[in-house]
């Protein structure tokens, strides 16, 4: 009887569920260190979304890609604000409407090593399938990361042990250092992310080149993903409602501000056109 009485008191028995947001160090979306710490596009965006979800307590947790996927699949009450949709992920993760678009992943190589890749380049794009089949280079990737359906399909065919997979919290930075030391000749990343991580590692971006991969689209679509549980699906209803406004009024510009000036205007036009139909 006492317990029932206490439940009727204001503030008693009404504890909010805690939604855990899984964040990775992925400039310019999220920036964990350096002079621009906390100023990434998603860093700036999260307080706005959280303020529109007072139904929950919110906890921001820093994880690497592998740990983040593990937590999403364990059915804890978790969401990731920077997730690419894949058929495999969709089996255990509920995805939001598109939240923003990003320039597609590609190969990051040292300009000094470009001669290794020229035989596989046509019309400004590299034939990644043929490159890997030639077994002339060692390629670095972040473990359990999706690079988009075109690149993922190619990587899935590579025999075990032939890719250099990195599981660490600073995977992209570590892969760049491995590339610099000659332990691998290429890695896959978003170009803005690679540039930001290079500067953090003391590598001049001018030393690097970005090679778009044959048949990849210009942009990839990013979503928020939550564990596919009753809690996750309920939270996603709220997220989708809020993102229909926030993706254009704030997130689009937060990301665009990190692009080179010559890319910014076209990106904003493309993103707005995309959101009109998605």
Image (tube, rainbow, N blue to C red):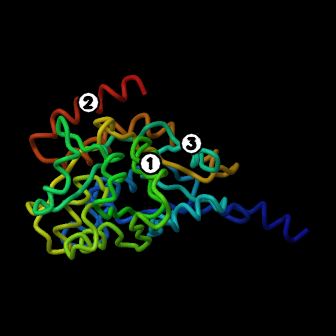
Q: Nearer the viewer, residue 26 or 50?
A: 26
**Residue in view at x 56 percent, y 42 percent:** 87
Lateral position of residue 247 relative to residue 34, left or right: right
Q: Nearer the viewer, residue 131 or 183?
A: 131
| Residues marked 3 and 1 touching at CB (< 8 Å) | no
Q: Nearer the viewer, residue 124 or 146?
A: 124
Residue bearing the label numbered 1: 152
Mark 2 or mark 1: which is in front? Answer: 1
Q: Which of 190 and 216 is in front in this view?
A: 216
Q: Which mark is residue 242?
A: none
Where residue 182 sits, quadrant-wise, is bottom left
| Residues marked 3 and 2 touching at CB (< 8 Å) | no
**Residue in view at x 19 percent, y 67 percent:** 198
Q: Which of marks 2 and 1 is nearer the N terminus?
A: 1
Cα distance between the residues tagged 2 and 1 = 24 Å
Q: Earlier in the sequence, mark 3 or mark 1?
A: 3
Q: How crowded is mark 1: few (under 14 residues within 10 Å), some or many (20 or more)?
A: few
Tell me if residue 31 comes above or below residue 192 in the rendering. below
Q: Position of residue 206 (x, y in %)?
A: 8, 60
Q: Residues within 10 Å of mark 3 (few under 14, many from 20)?
A: few
Q: Earlier in the sequence, mark 3 or mark 2?
A: 3
Cα distance between the residues tagged 3 and 2 = 25 Å
Tell me if residue 124 comes above or below residue 76 in the rendering. above
Q: Which mark is residue 270?
A: 2
For mark 3, give the secondary structure: loop
């Amino acid at each position: 009887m006492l317990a029932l009485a206490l439940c009727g008191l204001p503030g008693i028995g009404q504890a909010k569920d805690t939604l855990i947001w899984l964040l990775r160090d992925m400039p310019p979306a999220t920036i964990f260190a350096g002079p621009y710490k906390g100023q990434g596009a998603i860093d700036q965006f999260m307080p706005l979304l959280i303020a529109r979800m007072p139904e929950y307590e919110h906890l921001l947790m820093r994880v690497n890609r592998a740990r983040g996927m593990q937590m999403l699949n364990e059915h804890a009450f978790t969401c990731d604000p920077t997730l690419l949709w894949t058929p495999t992920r969709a089996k255990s993760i509920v995805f939001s409407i598109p939240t923003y678009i990003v320039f597609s992943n590609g190969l990051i190589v040292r300009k000094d090593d470009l001669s290794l890749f020229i035989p596989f380049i046509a019309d400004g794009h590299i034939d990644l399938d043929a490159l890997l089949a030639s077994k002339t280079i060692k390629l670095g990737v972040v473990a359990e990361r999706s690079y988009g359906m075109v690149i993922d399909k190619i990587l899935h065919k590579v025999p075990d042990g032939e890719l250099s997979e990195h599981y660490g919290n600073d995977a992209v930075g570590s892969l760049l250092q491995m590339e610099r030391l000659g332990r691998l000749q290429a890695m896959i990343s978003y170009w803005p992310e690679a540039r930001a991580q290079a500067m953090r590692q003391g590598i001049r971006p001018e030393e690097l080149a970005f090679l778009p991969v044959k048949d990849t689209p210009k942009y990839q679509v990013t979503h928020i993903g939550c564990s596919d549980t009753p809690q996750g699906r309920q939270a996603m209803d709220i997220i989708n409602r809020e993102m229909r406004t926030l993706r254009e009024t704030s997130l689009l510009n937060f990301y665009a501000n990190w692009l080179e000036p010559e890319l910014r205007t076209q990106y904003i036009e493309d993103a707005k056109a995309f959101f009109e139909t998605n």
